[in-house]
């Protein structure tokens, strides 16, 4: 139910980052191109959450298919590992957002 960090489509900060982990970092967010399209931070989070939910649902469906004998063990393992990565990424992002909110709330006005 939670997607990987690739769902967030971060712009690579280091040259060659895309080559080191293809598909993990995809350009677009925070660039002028993204701003001209009109995507907002809320839209990005909505898309990331949707992809995460789809990833977790896919893992559930694959597990059910395996119980029925319709799916290969490798397919199930890949789906479950992808769901695990997605969940861990979402939890990390949530923790960063909460931490940033708490830090902002402590600022003097």
Image (cartoon, rainbow, N blue to C red):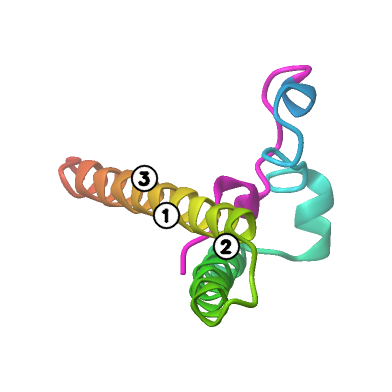
Q: Residue at x 46, y 69 (%)?
A: 1
Q: Magenta stretch containing residue 55, yes or no? A: no
Q: Considering only order in the chain, which callout, 2 or 1, is on the residue closer to the N terminus?
A: 2
Q: Residue at x 62, y 53 (%)?
A: 74
| Residue designated by label 1 | 90
Q: Label 3: state its secondary structure.
A: helix
Q: Label 1: state its secondary structure.
A: helix
Contact check, label 3 and label 1, Cβ < 8 Å:
yes
* Quarter the C terminus occupies: top left
Can you give x and y, in whole percent of width and height, for residue 45 in the image?
A: 53, 63
Can you give x and y, in whole percent of width and height, for residue 66 in the image?
A: 54, 72
Q: Nearer the viewer, residue 54 or 58?
A: 58
Q: Callout 2: 10 Å neighbours few (<14), some, many (20+)?
A: many
Q: Callout 3: 10 Å neighbours few (<14), some, many (20+)?
A: few
| Residue designated by label 2 | 48
Q: Magenta stretch containing residue 13, yes or no? A: yes
- Outermost top residue: 15
Q: Nearer the viewer, residue 54 or 95?
A: 54
Q: Considering only order in the chain, which callout, 2 or 3, is on the residue closer to the N terminus?
A: 2
| Spatial CA span between label 1 and label 2 | 9 Å
Q: Quadrant of residue 61?
A: bottom right
Decide if residue 29 is on the left or right side of residue 4. right
Q: What stretch of residues is rendered in magenta? A: 1-16
Contact check, label 1 and label 2, Cβ < 8 Å:
yes
Q: Callout 1: 10 Å neighbours few (<14), some, many (20+)?
A: many
| Residue designated by label 3 | 92
Q: Label 2: state its secondary structure.
A: helix
Q: Residue at x 64, y 77 (%)?
A: 70
Classify 32 as above or below 39. Answer: above
| Spatial CA span between label 3 and label 1 | 5 Å
Q: Quadrant of residue 11?
A: top right
């Amino acid at each position: 139910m939670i997607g990987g960090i690739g769902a967030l489509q971060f712009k690579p900060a280091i040259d060659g980052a895309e080559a080191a982990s293809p598909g993990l970092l995809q350009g677009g967010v925070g660039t002028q191109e993204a701003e001209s399209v009109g995507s907002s931070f809320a839209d990005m989070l909505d898309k990331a959450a949707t992809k995460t939910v789809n990833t977790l649902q896919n893992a559930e469906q694959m597990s059910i298919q395996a119980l029925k004998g319709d799916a290969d063990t490798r397919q199930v393992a890949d789906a479950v590992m992808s769901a695990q990565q997605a969940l861990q990424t979402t939890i990390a992002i949530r923790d960063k957002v909460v931490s940033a909110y708490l830090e902002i709330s402590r600022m003097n006005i």
